[in-house]
Amino acid sequence: MGDKTSKFNTFTFFKLPSAWWCGVRLKYMDDKKAITTVTHRWVNQNPFKSMFWAVQGMAAELSTGAMVIDQIRQSGKRISMLVQNNNANFSKKATGKITFTCEDGHLIAEAIEKTIATGEGQKFWMKSVGVNQDGIVVSTFNFEWTVRLKS
């Protein structure tokens, strides 16, 4: 695990404690891709003996949001970020270790550049796909992020 992911998991403990206690962890991140994992356990299950949908959502959102946070930090500007919309599809019971991957990091830099240049907020959608240990897709989440320059 790289220094960047280790620092981000520490951030998660202090700033997103519910995700941390449910077992959500950032495993990999660069400017284009981020990977998070979460393992089905008693603390994050639903009554149907699978992972609660909201826990999957936390792991999926972190795979998108971690890159947004990192690229805002790299910009050196004061920029706010917020999820404005999201949707999800659940295609299989989530049991065992679930890995969420987002490969939409390339969308962030353009939005940050535009909000800095124009002063207007920008929106962009990012997708995160969760697969189980057999490589079968269990859920797909889409998040519409907004970024804008703080005044």
Image (spheres, grey):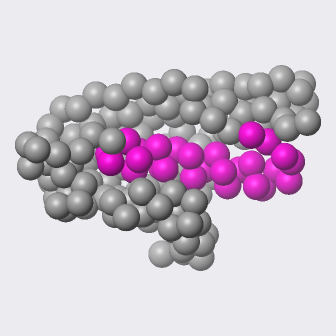
Residue situated in front as seen by the camera: 35 or 51: 51
Q: Is residue 103 left or right of residue 84?
A: left
Which residue is at 71% across, 50% downward? 71
Residue span colored magenta:
55-80
Percent x, y of residue 124: 61, 27
Total numbered labels placed on residues in the image? 0
Q: Position of residue 33 (x, y in %)?
A: 52, 50
User: In the rendered image, which quarter contains the C terminus?
Assistant: top right
| Residue furthest to the left | 48
Q: Quadrant of residue 24?
A: bottom left
- Out of 150 and 1, give the one closest to the viewer: 150
Measured from the top left, where is residue 13 in percent x and y? 50, 67
Residue 39 in view, yes or no = yes
On screen, residue 62 versus residue 53, left or right, reads right
Residue 132 seen anywhere in this rendered image of the structure: no
Q: Nearer the viewer, residue 101 or 73?
A: 73
Q: Is residue 38 magenta?
A: no
Q: Position of residue 97 (x, y in %)?
A: 23, 59
Residue in the image at 89% along x and 25% along y:
118
Judged left or right of residue 57, residue 134 is left
Is the residue 106 above or below the residue 133 in the image?
Answer: above
**Magenta span main SS:** helix
The residue sitting at 47% across, 43% down in the picture is 61
Seen at 55% across and 71% down, the residue is 10
In the image, is residue 75 part of the stretch drawn in magenta?
yes
